[in-house]
Image (cartoon, rainbow, N blue to C red):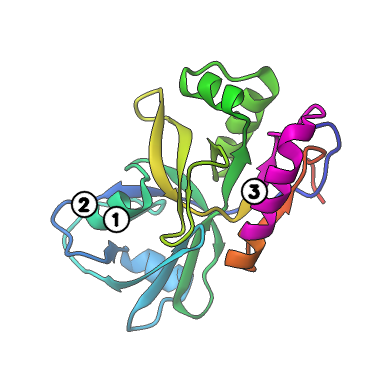
Amino acid sequence: MKNEVEKIGSQNAEKFELTEIPSLPRQSICLTEEQINCLGISPGPIALKIGVKVFFVDRHEQEISLNANQIGISQDILAETGLYSGLKLSLITNRNNVLWLGPIFAVLLSPTGWDMAKKGNIVKELKYSEQLAHELGYLMYYFTAHDINWSEQKMLGCYLNRKTGNWEENWLPLPDVVYDLATFPGRKDLLEIAKDILKQFRNSNDTIAGYNCVFSISKKGH
């Protein structure tokens, strides 16, 4: 991860905190009137996109004290995405009643790297990348080639829950971006597997971007 390329997130992007509201009906979100006006939300269903997962949700109005940077979200959406209340994500787009939050950034690790990640033994550069991802408002998680459920478009990921301070495993949506670190440095035995995985990602959803190990995350502008 030496060369800097265009960052996917933006330091200036608006960030929202996912806030679980147990009283919300299924497939619902809660927005303030100020948010509705600022985001240009029209009456009718809203498409909430997180990774490749899209929920068609109802905007539920109730007396909930939310600040301008919180989105109330129903329990079932958090459960299905494997995300946690308190996670902050950037707003990628809000056009035509579509709220796309993220991006979700997945790093492909070797089995050895995965075992280390689960124990919180993350190499320095990946710790820096995860911290930067948090600051930019997107989620970074780690995975292996063996933990992908293509039919349900989910994979087992390991991420830092910043509410608990623990590295946790959960089934998460397929990401917006995949970064291959499993073949670095020179793991020829994993190269073909990684190539196949990246190809499957692109075939499963043409919005997923894939990068090899020369990609890195940067605060620099384009």
Give amino acid for label 2: Ile
Q: CA distance from mark 1 to mark 3?
A: 28 Å
Give residue 214's mark.
none
Circle 3: element type: strand
Residue 165 vertical position relative to residue 41 in the rendered view, above or below: above
Near mark 2 (Cα within 10 A), the count class, few <14, some 14-19 or many ≥20, is some
Q: Residue 35: percent from the left, percent from the top?
A: 40, 65
Residue receiving disc 3: 178
Which residue is depicted at the point 26% across and 66% down? Answer: 27
Query: In this view of the protein, can residue 219 be seen by the observer?
Result: no
Give amino acid for label 1: Gly
Identify the image quadrant of the N terminus. Answer: top right
Near mark 3 (Cα within 10 A), the count class, few <14, some 14-19 or many ≥20, is many
Question: Does the segment drawn in magenta span residue 192?
Answer: yes
Residue receiving disc 2: 21
Q: Are marks 1 and 2 in contact (CB under 8 Å)?
A: yes
Circle 2: element type: loop
Q: Residue 220: percent from the left, percent from the top?
A: 79, 41
Part of the protein shown in magenta: 178-200
Query: In this view of the protein, can residue 81 be seen by the observer?
Result: yes
Residue receiving disc 1: 72
Find residue 2 and report its image quarter.
Answer: top right
* Front residue (pair 181, 64): 181
